[in-house]
Every structure is written in C-alpha cells, then in structure tokens.
Image (spheres, rainbow, N blue to C red):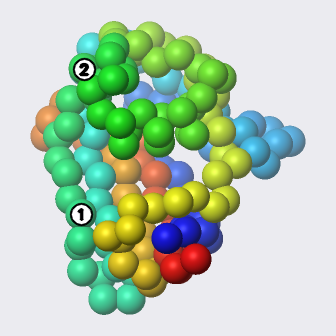
Amino acid sequence: MKAVCLGLELKYNRSNVDYFGLVPGESQKMMINSTKLFKNIFLDNRIQNAVSNRTIYNIKNLAICNFLNNRLISKVYSVIYEGFVGNSTVFRCPVQPSVYYLSNSVREFEVPIFHQPGMFRLYVKLKAEKEGNMLTELIWRYRVRRI
C-alpha cells in the first residue's frame, strides 16, 4: 500500500509559538519558533476518512516526552520522527524555547497493508497539558492506493 500526500495545513497557538510554517524561500523545510519552555508535551492524532468523515484511528494524550527521550519506545513513531525531523533538529524534554527545523519533503510513503485505500486526513495536535489548548496542529490530506 502506498500513500501520496495531497496537502498539508499548519496551525499554531501564537501565545506559545511565534511561527510555524515554511522556512522563507524554501518549500522542503519548515520551522517552528517556540517561545516557551515545555516540561511536558502530549499528542493527539486521528486518521479520518475524507469522504465519510469516519474516524478509523484515534489516540489522545500520548506523553511525547517519554518517546523523545527514548525513541525505541515506538517503532511506528520512530519512523515518522525520522522522516519528519531526521537529523535537522534534536527534540528533548523539557523542550527549550528555540527555533526547530522539520522536513517538508515527504510526498509518498508506504502504509501498513491493513490501511484501506481511499482519501484520508491525518490530524496531529501537540499540547503542553493533557486537556490544554493546542500548541501546534498539522493536518495532512493523503490518498492510499494499492501498488
């Protein structure tokens, strides 16, 4: 199964993040300018069928600091981390105020065989508290097809 990225939407909370978007003059690199120290970070992510709006995968309040400090915890998230962050930035907890760089070059990627074909949206929300406001949110639109 192969997925093709169709688009990416970025949102951020301006009280905690000064900028989250493409590096000026580049299309393959993004940056995030974090203005506060974050002792904890929690992740919500959801995959939704773009046609029916049915949620097919949902995870809430995943403690990211454990993963950032030991990426062997999850093979799936490690692959995503390497593709998106790679060697351009090192994230550790507590996350210090700084400018961080991320890759925007993922266009095609393989998905597990159990992922159904069709059009989907992947929502990824990072928060400083379990029930807190979002720091950043990414929404990927993608199509999955059999190869």
Residue 4 lies, in percent from the top left, at 60, 69
Query: Which numbered tag is attached to residue 131?
Result: none
Residue most extreme to the bottom: 52
Residue 61: which quarter of the image? Answer: top left
Of 34 and 50, the residue lying toward us: 50
The numbered mark, 2 or 1, whose residue comes first in the sequence reads 1
Tell me if residue 20 can be seen: no
For the point 23% across and 73% down, which residue is it? 55
Element type at mark 1: strand
Residue 37: which quarter of the image? Answer: top left
Neighbour class for label 2 at 10 Å: few (<14), some, many (≥20)? Answer: some
Residue ID for mark 2 = 66
Residue ID for mark 1 = 57
Residue 145 lies, in percent from the top left, at 53, 79
- C-alpha separation, residue under disc 2 versus residue under disc 1: 21 Å
Residue 96 lies, in percent from the top left, at 44, 11
